[in-house]
Image (spheres, rainbow, N blue to C red):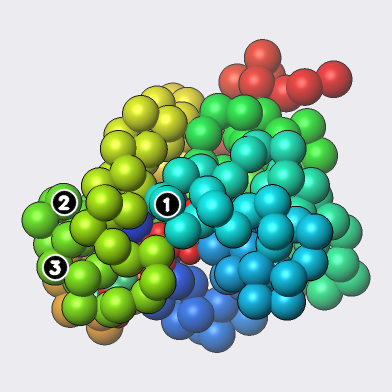
Amino acid sequence: MKLLIVGPPGSGKGTQSLRMSRALGIPHVSTGALLRHAIRLGTPLGESACECVAAGHLVPDALVNELVRERLGHTTVRERGFLLDGFPRNRAQLDGLLSWLNPEALDAAIELAVPSEIVVQRLTSRGRTDDTEAGIDTRLGAYEVETSPMLRDLEAAGLLIPIAADRPIDVVTRDILASLAQHRAKPPTCLPMQRVAV
Ligand code: B4P
C-alpha cells in the first residue's frame, strides 16, 4: 500500500503514522524525523536543513525530494509500499513524487484536520526545539500557503480522506483505519496526468 499522511504541524501525523504503520505492516517514512536525524548527526544535509527546521520554514524542495527519492528506493519500501509522513508539503514536492511513481500507485492521502488553537496548545506542551511560538506561527503559515493548495489536487484526484483529528488518539486511529478500508473498496482513481513530470 502507498499512503500519504498530511496535516498542519501538531495534527498528529507522527503519532498516527506509527500506529498505522504497525496496523498495516507498511514502512513509515517521516521527512521531519529524517531531517532531525540528519541534523543530530551533522551530515551535509543536516547542516543545510538546520536553520529552516529551527525557524519553522520548509526545507528547500530539492533537498527533501532527494531525501525521499533515496528512501523510496530501499528494498523494504519497494517490496511493502510506504506511509509518507509530512511529504509532499507543496505542489513542487507532489510533482517530484509523481515523477518517480506511477500516479495510479498512490492509494490514498489521509488529511488530519485540527483547528489552529488546538495545534498551538499541543505543540507548546510538547516542547521540541522547533516548537517555539514564532516557529509554530511560521509552520501554520507555510501549511496554509503551500500545503493547502496541494490538497486540492489530491482531492480532485479522489485520493483525499479528511479525518477530524481533534479527538482522542485512539478514536482518530480507528477512524483512519475504517475510512481507509472504505476508500479501498471503491474503484481506483488517479491524479491528473499534467502533474506527472516527464
Ligand atoms: P514534522 O516532523 O512533520 O512535525 P510536525 O508537523 O510538527 O508534527 P506532527 O503532525 O507529526 O505532530 P505529532 O504527531 O508529533 O515537521 C517538522 C519540520 O521539518 C517542519 O517544520 C519543516 O521544517 C521540516 N519538514 C518536514 N517535512 C518537510 C517537507 N516535506 N518539506 C520541507 N520541510 C519539511 O503530534 C504533536 C503533539 O500532539 C504530540 O505531543 C502528540 O502527543 C500530540 N497529539 C497528537 N495527536 C493527538 C490527539 N489526537 N490528541 C491529543 N494530543 C495529540
- Name the residue at the top extreme: 194
Please name whichever residue, 76 or 142, is drawn nearer the observer in this view of the structure: 142
Q: Is residue 69 visible?
A: yes
SS for callout 1: helix
Q: Say which residue appears at 84% left-offset and 56% top-offset.
A: 70
Q: Earlier in the sequence, mark 2 or mark 3?
A: 2
Q: Residue under label 1, please give it.
A: 55
Q: Say which residue appears at 10% left-offset and 56% top-offset.
A: 117
Relative vertical location of residue 145 with respect to residue 178 in this rendering, above or below: above
Q: Residues within 10 Å of mark 3 (few under 14, many from 20)?
A: few
Q: Looking at the image, is mark 3 or mark 1 nearer the viewer?
A: 1
Please name whichever residue, 74 or 122, is drawn nearer the observer in this view of the structure: 122
Indicate left or right for 71 with 161 as reference.
Answer: right
Cβ of mark 3 under 8 Å from ligand 1: the answer is: no
Q: Residues within 10 Å of mark 2 (few under 14, many from 20)?
A: some
Q: CA distance from mark 2 to mark 1?
A: 18 Å
SS for callout 2: helix
Q: Position of residue 19 (x, y in %)?
A: 45, 81
Q: Residue under label 2, please give it.
A: 116
Relative vertical location of residue 17 with respect to residue 62 in this rendering, above or below: below
Q: Earlier in the sequence, mark 3 or mark 1?
A: 1
Amino acid found under the numbered disc labelled 3 = Gln
Amino acid found under the numbered disc labelled 1 = Ala
Q: Say which residue appears at 63% left-offset and 53% top-offset.
A: 49
Query: How many numbered discs, if any?
Result: 3
Q: Say which residue appears at 50% left-offset and 56% top-offset.
A: 53
Q: Give the image quarter of residue 103.
A: top right
Amino acid found under the numbered disc labelled 2 = Ser
Indicate left or right for 111 with 96 as reference.
Answer: left
Q: Residue under label 3, please give it.
A: 121
Cβ of mark 1 under 8 Å from ligand 1: the answer is: yes
